[in-house]
Image: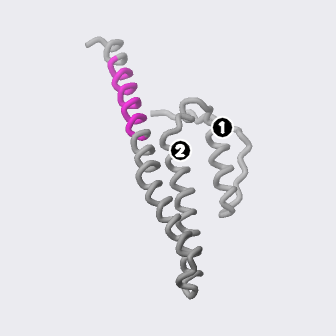
């Protein structure tokens, strides 16, 4: 097989592989959102109902803590699902993607990151 045909074939295989990977990630994202998200939402509603009914006043702190953890998990789950089903990698530049990640990490208040948007190409020799 001539070199040009081989390269064309490899490009087609890579394209097909990337398309299949994207479809798989979107499927996983939808499943996470639809299945696990619904169960966590239902559990959150149950804990809110328990707190509202106040049938076990001595357990209210535990119920509120449980509800808080569930709601935080729901929020993280939605963000993960959105990331898996989002095609922003294809639509945004590397600078925009890095800036978004920096903003997300800085927003978590775990650490402070500064990114100036400068990317220096590295010449790799193989």
The residue where tag 1 is placed is 96
Q: Which of 34 and 119 is in front in this view?
A: 34
The local secondary structure at tag 1 comes to helix
Q: Which of 44 and 69 is in front in this view?
A: 44
Circle 1 Cα neighbour tier, 10 Å, few/some/many (<14 / 14–19 / ≥20): some
Residue at (58% x, 29% y) in the render = 91
The residue where tag 2 is placed is 82
Q: Is residue 1 above or below residue 33?
A: above
Residue at (56% x, 63% y) in the render = 71
Residue at (70% x, 54% y) in the render = 113
x and y percent of residue 28 in the render? 40, 45
Q: Is residue 125 toward the left or the right of residue 64 in the image?
A: left
Q: Does the magenta stretch include residue 43?
A: no
Q: Which of 119 and 83 is in front in this view?
A: 83
* Magenta span: 9-25
Q: Is residue 125 above or below residue 44?
A: above
Identify the mark at residue 125; answer none if there is no mark: none
Residue at the bottom extreme of this rendering: 58
């Amino acid at each position: 097989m001539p070199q040009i045909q081989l390269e064309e074939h490899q490009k087609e295989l890579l394209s097909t592989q990337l398309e299949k990977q994207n479809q798989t990630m979107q499927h996983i994202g939808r499943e996470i959102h639809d299945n696990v998200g619904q169960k966590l939402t239902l559990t959150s509603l149950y804990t809110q109902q328990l707190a509202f009914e106040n049938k076990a006043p001595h357990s209210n702190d535990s119920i509120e803590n449980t509800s808080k953890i569930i709601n935080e998990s729901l929020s993280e789950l939605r963000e993960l699902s959105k990331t898996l089903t989002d095609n922003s990698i294809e639509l945004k530049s590397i600078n925009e993607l890095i800036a978004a990640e920096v903003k997300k990490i800085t927003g978590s208040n775990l650490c402070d990151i500064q990114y100036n948007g400068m990317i220096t190409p590295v010449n790799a020799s193989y």
